[in-house]
Image (tube, rainbow, N blue to C red):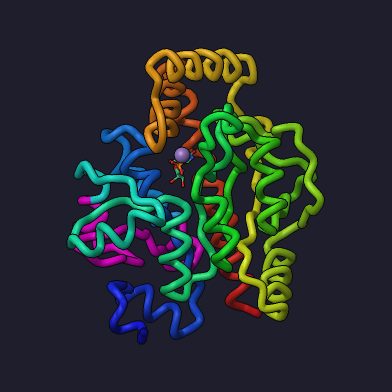
Amino acid sequence: MPLSDTPLSVSHDVADALSSGTPVVALESTIISHGLPKSEALDAAHRFEQLLRDQGVVPATVAVLDGRMRAGLTESELERVATEDLPKLSMRDLPVVLARGGSGSTTVASTSFIADQAGIRVFATGGLGGVHRGAAQSFDESADLKTLSEVPITVVSAGVKSILDIPATLERLESLGVIVLGYGTAEFPGFWLSSSGQPLDWSVPDADAVAAVMESREQLEMCEGIIVANPLPVSEQLDPEVHDRALEEALRRAGEKQVEGKDVTPFLLSSIVELTAGRSLAVNLTIVENNIRVGAEIATAWARL
Ligand code: PSU
Ligand code: MN
């Protein structure tokens, strides 16, 4: 199907940048609509985009609005994402919501898919979805993993949150053939903590090295995504003791309330914000900003190639 027939709208800014070789970085909207308190969401969405512009990169925040996939939002569209109660859309939700002319925020999976359809190669986020604790019983594994094995995007993240089973997530990424590069580290980051303690096979020193891997993947015509695992500096991580206590209590609450399915991630995240008196949220924002900076460097290095 020609691109003009697909329900995809690329903003003028983003389309111009893509055709002129100006670097573009995609941003997801689930962080904005579900990952942050409503009071913070719009400011954060603005800040994320501005950070990219400051580095000479065009931001492409991704969402679904009124039955169309969007890459690059206007001010009023960004406001809608931050203030309306939009459903969180993973891959399998896209055809249904598009068919109904509906709207929603996009996860890592659906953002990766839409960004790729728009021709965007780099995406910056906070943390990825992964294998949940207890997945051996519940089979709860984020569709992010499957999609990242099918879409040749490069996503910058601080690993996955400790609310998940991190070793199992890394095993699944290996099975799925997703490329994982430690950015200046040989250990997988632990989101709020600089390291999860899990070793990685590959580490890269800088954005040029990531762009070189992207080029090499392209030469091999591989479709698997690249995860650039970018840790927080130790000086900015959440106090490990505060982290461990909040995590334990949040998991206990989720078990007690029998939270299931796609509600698990937002429930645990908001519980941890409450249990750390907002500190996890401040660290969360720092993480996304850090990843955006690295995403901008990678997109710039890629545009140079
Ligand atoms: N991890 C975070 N913050 C988030 C998410 C993950 O630290 O907001 C969101 C992302 O959009 C991710 C999604 O793609 O949750 C994964 O949800 P699920 O496990 O339901 O696939
Ligand atoms: Mn799930």
Q: Position of residue 302 (x, y in %)?
A: 61, 73
Q: Position of residue 19 (x, y in %)?
A: 44, 85
Residue extent of the magenta highlight: 52-80
Q: Position of residue 193 (x, y in %)?
A: 64, 30
The answer to whether residue 168 is left or right of residue 160 is right
Say above or below: 249 vs 176.
Answer: above
The answer to whether residue 293 is left or right of residue 96 is right
| Count of labels in the image | 0
Say above or below: 123 vs 134.
Answer: below
Please identify the quadrant where the C terminus is shown.
bottom right
Which residue reaches farthest front?
137
Q: Nearer the viewer, residue 52 or 182?
A: 182
Q: Nearer the viewer, residue 175 or 30?
A: 175
Q: Residue at x 54, y 64 (%)?
A: 122
Q: Residue at x 62, y 78 (%)?
A: 304
Q: Residue at x 33, y 73 (%)?
A: 10
Q: Position of residue 231 (x, y in %)?
A: 66, 41
Say above or below: 249 vs 12.
Answer: above
The image quarter in which residue 191 lies = top right
Q: Nearer the viewer, residue 248 or 191?
A: 248
Please identify the quadrant where the N terminus is shown.
bottom left
